[in-house]
């Protein structure tokens, strides 16, 4: 039985507490929450857990093997560092940290301490993303050409991070899980309309070595909620709509055929269009957070790395930090390879 300590019982903490409490191989032993009203809710929802405002009490408890961190981004690094140094395995809400240097240090510490460090990139564990991963790895789509994502809605305006740090982390985690490639550069633009110098709209463009490109549209100021991604391949294409209740993935047998034309003709290259069937595959309907909790507990028990480990979290933070730099300077930012 893996003893669990949770830090933060605000927006996301209750969800983590619920799924880990229901896991047969885990037991929620303690919740650290400094706000009295949220602590009271934690005590009501989990009467058998120890509720405390003191984080050190969790670190000192030898029966707690893993710490879940669901607090504001600015606190991720000191909390995760303290937990790793105390010999605890750690699951951190996305994004891993607010700085690349801090993420690098956590990855190094986890390796040195022999600890599991995972990031709560929940979308990776959905049935839709798992199916897309299967299709890409089996080459059903052919050579990938682009990744085009739209994640917009009206609100929720954050007080500590902009729309990039709030929303882009989801789609970057999905992208890097699916293609396992690192971008060469990032170029971005954003704007603030709330008078607080926090961007509520942003556009991000990533370039890769093999002519693959990725584009992200993020917006807190949209009249509708959209969660849609298009993935292009030389054989087939995918439309992933997370707002669809059932057919979240549609695979289109569509594309172009490029032919060499008559050398004496003005049209030396001819482009034909290919249109085939559309298929909506059956997806696993298991709650993603439940799957993620099971995976994390399995990693802790068997000492195996998570598919959303610290390195995966670091790659996301690298792009987020470079995106912020690009927005502020208006320049294309080169990324480490």
Image: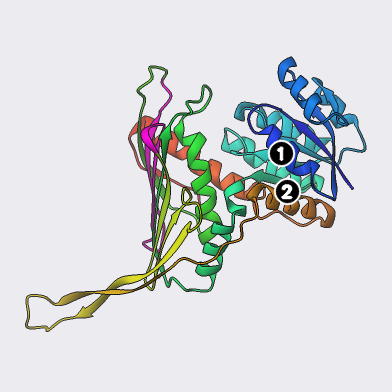
Label pair 2/1, CB-CB below 8 angstroms: yes
**Element assignment for label 1:** helix
Q: What crowding class fits label 2: few (fewer than 14 Cα within 10 Å), some (14-19), or many (20 or more)?
A: many
Q: Quadrant of residue 93?
A: top right
Does any portion of residue 287 appear in the rendered image? yes
279 versus 68 height, above or below: below
Q: Quick one: 337 or 52, which is closer to the camera?
A: 52
Q: Quick one: 91 or 229, which is closer to the camera?
A: 229
Question: Which residue is disc 2 drawn over?
Answer: 293
* Residue range corresponding to the magenta coloring: 197-224
Q: Residue furthest front?
A: 245
Residue at point 85%, 50% (across, down): 25
Question: Which residue is disc 1 drawn over?
Answer: 16
316 versus 55 height, above or below: below
Counting residues from the start of the chain, the first of labels 2 and 1 encountered is 1
Residue 273 spot, x, y in % from top left: 24, 73
239 versus 172 height, above or below: below
């Amino acid at each position: 039985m893996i003893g669990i300590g949770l830090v933060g019982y605000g927006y996301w903490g209750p969800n983590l507490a619920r799924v880990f409490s229901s896991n047969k191989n885990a037991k929620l032993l303690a919740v650290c929450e400094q706000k009295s009203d949220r602590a009271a809710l934690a005590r009501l929802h989990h009467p058998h857990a120890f509720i405390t405002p003191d984080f050190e009490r969790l670190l000192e408890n030898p029966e707690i093997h893993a710490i879940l961190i669901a607090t504001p981004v600015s606190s991720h690094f000191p909390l995760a560092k303290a937990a790793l140094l105390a010999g605890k395995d750690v699951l951190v809400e996305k994004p891993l940290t607010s700085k690349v240097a801090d993420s690098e240090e956590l990855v190094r510490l986890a390796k040195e301490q022999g600890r599991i460090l995972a990031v709560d990139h929940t979308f990776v564990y959905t049935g839709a993303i798992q199916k897309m991963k299967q299709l890409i790895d089996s080459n059903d789509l052919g050579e990938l050409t682009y990744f085009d994502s739209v994640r917009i809605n009206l609100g929720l305006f954050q007080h500590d991070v902009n729309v990039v740090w709030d929303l882009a982390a989801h789609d970057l985690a999905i992208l890097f899980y699916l293609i396992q490639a690192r971008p060469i550069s990032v170029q971005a633009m954003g704007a603030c309309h709330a008078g607080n110098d926090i961007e509520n709209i942003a556009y991000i463009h990533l370039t890769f070595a093999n002519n693959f490109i990725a584009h992200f549209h993020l917006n807190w100021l949209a009249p509708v909620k959209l969660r849609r991604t298009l993935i292009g391949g030389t054989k087939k294409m995918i439309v992933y709509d997370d707002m669809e209740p059932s057919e979240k993935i549609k695979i289109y047998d569509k594309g172009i055929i490029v032919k060499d034309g008559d050398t004496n003709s003005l049209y030396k290259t001819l482009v034909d269009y290919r249109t085939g069937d559309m298929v909506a595959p059956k997806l696993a309907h298991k709650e993603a957070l439940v799957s993620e909790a099971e995976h994390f507990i399995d990693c802790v028990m068997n000492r195996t790395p998570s598919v959303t480990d610290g390195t995966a979290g670091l790659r996301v933070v690298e792009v987020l930090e470079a995106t912020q730099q690009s927005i502020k300077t208006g320049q294309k930012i080169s990324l480490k390879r």
